[in-house]
Image (cartoon, rainbow, N blue to C red):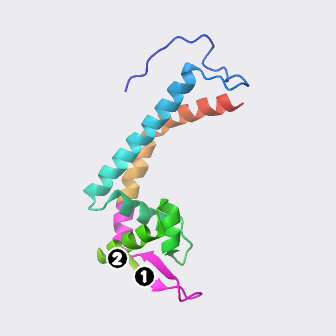
Amino acid sequence: MAQSKRKTTRPASAAPSKGGAMREADYAALAQFRYQLRTFLAFSETAAQNAGLTPQQHQALLAIKGLAAPDGASVGDIARFLLIRHHTAVELVDRMAKLKLIGREADPQDARRVLVRLTAKGEQKLRSLSRIHLDELGAAAPALAKILRSFRAKAR
């Protein structure tokens, strides 16, 4: 996506006024940031589908591995991590258990809670997807860093 070179009345490095005035460069930076995010998310969704997972299943595997306590994640944790309702998380966990991506066991501290952990199959799928995601982020890093630096400069 080519960036337009618009002329502004203020230099690109000038911060917005205290009154919150927005410059064309502010809109361009926000648009570029959202574009980069959407590009990465589209890549991620396609990669998950190519691996035989839904994007939500991939997100759940990553959340269980990366955000949960060492003993596992509860269904409530998964709902919170993915910003979904509890009953939606229950359905997701049920589908993932049928695919043998995760296993469930009673929480040793509270038998009313069920903890979810990745199976060897879930670990393998996540490892494969995470490698290509890190490569994709590495490729996007220069553009993202430039955008983030422009936001930091505006915050001063």
Residue at (28%, 59%) from the top-left corner? 51
Magenta span has 129?
no
Residue 61: name its quadrant: bottom left
Q: Amino acid at mark 2?
A: Ala
The image shows residue 50 at horizontal and vertical percentages of 26, 55
Residue at (34%, 65%) from the top-left corner? 125
Q: Is residue 58 left or right of residue 18?
A: left
Secondary-structure class at tag 1: strand
Q: Is 3 in front, or is 34? A: 34
Query: Start and end of the magenta stretch?
Result: 104-128
Q: Which residue is mark 2?
A: 97
The image shows residue 67 at horizontal and vertical percentages of 54, 65
Q: Is residue 154 left or right of residue 116?
A: right
Residue at (70%, 22%) from the top-left corner? 17
Indicate the quadrant containing the C terminus: top left, top right, bottom left or bottom right. top right
The image shows residue 122 at horizontal and vertical percentages of 36, 70
> Mark 1: few, some, or many residues within 10 Å (few <14, many ≥20)?
some
Looking at the picture, does residue 96 appear above or below residue 40? below
Q: Which residue is mark 1?
A: 104
Looking at the picture, does residue 147 appear above or below residue 80? above
Q: Amino acid at mark 1?
A: Arg
What is the CA distance from the residue labelled 1 to the residue labelled 2? 8 Å
Q: Is residue 128 left or right of residue 79?
A: left
Looking at the picture, does residue 142 appear above or below residue 60? above
Contact flag, marks 1 and 2 (Cβ < 8 Å): yes
> Mark 2: few, some, or many residues within 10 Å (few <14, many ≥20)?
some
The image shows residue 39 at horizontal and vertical percentages of 38, 40
Question: Which tag, 1 or 2, sits closer to the chain's start?
Answer: 2
